[in-house]
Image (spheres, rainbow, N blue to C red):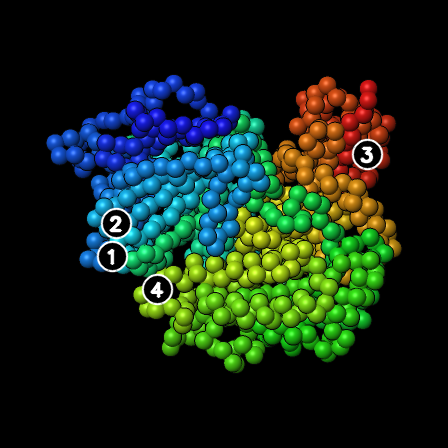
Amino acid sequence: MGIYVNENENTFLLTNDEISYLFRIMENGQLEQLYYGKQINYTGHFQRFVERSYRSVSVGEFTGDLVTSLESIKQEYPSFGGGDFREAAFEVELENGSHVMEFKYAGYEIRAGKHKIPDLPATFVNDPGDASTLQIKMKDDLTQTELLLNYTIFEKYPVIARAASIHNDGGQTLMLKRMMSASCDLPDCDYEFVHLSGAWGRERHLYRTPLRPGIQAVGSTRGSSSHIHNPFLLLARKTTTEHTGEAYSMSLVYSGNFLGQVEVDPYRISRIMMGIHPSKFNWVLPPGGAFHTPEAILVYSDQGFHKMSQAYHRLYNHHLIRGKYAGRERPIVINNWEGTYFDFNEEKILTMAEQASKLGVELFVLDDGWFGKRNTDTTSLGDWFVNEEKLPNGLGHLSKKINALGMKFGLWFEPEMTNGDSHIMREHPEWVVGTPHRQRKQGRHQYVLDFSQPEVVDYVFSLMDQILSSANIEYIKWDMNRCISEAYSCGLSAKAQGEFFHRYILGVYKLYDKLIQKYPDILFESCASGGGRFDPGMLYYAPQTWTSDDSDGIERLKIQYGTSYVYPISSMGSHVSSIPNHQVGRMTPLDTRANVAYFGTFGYELDPCALEQQEIEQIRKQIAYCKKHRRLMATGDFYRLLSPFEGNETAWMVVDEKKEKAVVGWYQVLSEPNEAYKRVKLTGLEEAAIYYIEELDSAYSGSELMYMGITLTPKINEVMDFNILDKRDFSSKLFTLVKIDR
Ligand code: GLA
């Protein structure tokens, strides 16, 4: 790994065994992108990567030179207004109303490790040798503004982390209108645009469409990263598959409004960029002021989607997720939400807990409804005081009782919200987001607290702190159940209203920071009406995220498959819920529900007292199975085998680092008459090794399992049994492999 600067050529090269990223200082002092992709060897002749051609209507950089035009040059961090008519990464308004800046190269710095980004989540190194950082300094002489571009290359991964900051060293107030975390011009446009999009209950489905000229984008202006689009984009060759072909991707370590876009220009260059959404973003930069962007993680894969996902999984597991649970197996949860909704009391909860503990559950999570007068979703958010009608002996008593059953106790909060009927709304209406003299619209009967005001964050912290110090609470589910409308803060001047959305999310991060500092051992699970804020920013604070409110095993195939493009399965909250499923009414069999949920942070979302004896026995076995294999699930490599977006079958597997253990899940949505022979081909195993498959009570070579596959068709003498047992919709099989001596 290294960062090489060639002062004769004015080039900067970041390279490791996997990737190279090359740019240079142009004659006008700006930066030109030269190469990004598979690792290339340093020859000292990178000048020949520079491409120039005469374009008749372009604006030239130098008087009399019609060839050097920013319009057709691949740029590194393009700014607005200087002859490049594509969308810029960056735009500032000066006091005189002009928008043109001329940032010119002004120096560089290289350091081991990487910088922290003030107040924002970001990847980190565990050891300075894990990564190297190049910081390029650019300067606009007229305004005395400095732009710092940070590039971190990780030693072991095909990853470059990018972020930028701007520092106003001049005398005038600047208005920052747009500042992306990263922008990169790729030399052609023969790609397909892949993104993770959806809605509540069907988050992060996979979409793949050919690029066309012009702009295509994903984004959010809802105040959260959202169910609709995930802060991730990917360009893949038409021929790219799971294990072959090129893939360029960006993932944003941020939980607020974002934009990820691709612009294909007339010369077939694809400009990809990602960062805070510029819509309604205006940041006042007074003299002496600075602004830091969130971090974008660029992954290049020359071997398809798997290699890309593996880079994200490893990076996020080892260099983003923090705390006691990072890289560790998670407790098996039971959450009472779908079991009781708001209708519970201490006795009911303790009966559920008792039953759950007998099943082997390790953590009881008391969901919404334990506070204020919260018997419906119309009241009490913000009233973080125990509901004594439901829990007359308080949370301290309840947690003790649950601990005595051998389980940890966890609690639901929705810290960012309040209802019309709450003490905050009565006492501090100015703490609630809303535009003056206009209706504040409700979402799920609730309003958003103005987390851009530090006193609101401090106040919510004090309420949560009282609860957390009153009982042994070892897990928090942090929910967020509405988008932000009528965005406006009483705490900001008229001119600074464009700072609201970013300041809001900084307030959310601040509250997480305060809680983690005081309660470092609490396991946080983030949630936003299910998976509405499943992003890398949240993972920095909460090692797991409730993947979706849709917990039907069949629906989860697409949701978890799509989510796995970026996020490790150890970060995906995935529970078995009751049937008929509360979101889709489906009667998915219990084994299939668990066979899907094992590939995540496992748990149950039901009333254990309503189970039949046969279900109880099955669940006991499921929990025992999970305990046996969850270390593998938390730390192994995840492979996608068959895509739910392409057919009736889905398959995936997890293999440990030493390739000695693996678990494979295979799922079939609808049963088929007179079906074709079926096999599932595994991957990631050692060819010559012998693996014993528990469920088949047989041994196979790794090569047989990978190239012939596991035969799913019944053996001849089992035809009848197979037909009777397995002819059903929503079926699944689990295969547990262990390497044995020959
Ligand atoms: C959201 C969450 C659910 C549950 C409810 C409680 O919808 O996604 O899991 O916690 O809120 O109101």
Look at 40% across and 72% down and name the residue there: 490
Q: Is residue 111 left or right of residue 732?
A: left
Q: Return the residue at label 4.
A: 496
Sequence-wise first label, 4 or 3: 4
User: Three-letter amino acid code at disc 2?
Assistant: Gln
Q: Are circles 1 and 2 on residues that touch, CB within 8 Å?
A: yes
Q: Return the residue at label 3.
A: 695
Residue at mark 4 to residue at mark 2: CA–CA distance: 22 Å
Q: Return the residue at label 2.
A: 144
Rendered location of residue 286, percent (x, y): 31, 59
Rendered location of residue 348, percent (x, y): 79, 69
Residue at mark 1 to residue at mark 4: CA–CA distance: 19 Å
Rendered location of residue 527, percent (x, y): 59, 57
Q: Return the residue at label 1.
A: 171
Sequence-wise first label, 3 or 1: 1
Q: Are circles 4 and 3 on residues that touch, CB within 8 Å?
A: no
Residues packed near mark 1 inside 10 Å, few (<14), some (14 to 19) or many (20 plus)? few
Sequence-wise first label, 4 or 2: 2
Say which of marks 3 and 1 sits in front. 1
Say which of marks 4 and 3 sits in front. 4
Sequence-wise first label, 3 or 2: 2
| Location of residue 637 (image quadrant) | top right
Rendered location of residue 584, percent (x, y): 65, 55
Vertical placement of residue 269 versus 603, above or below: above
Residue closer to the observer: 484 or 507: 507
Residues packed near mark 3 inside 10 Å, few (<14), some (14 to 19) or many (20 plus)? few
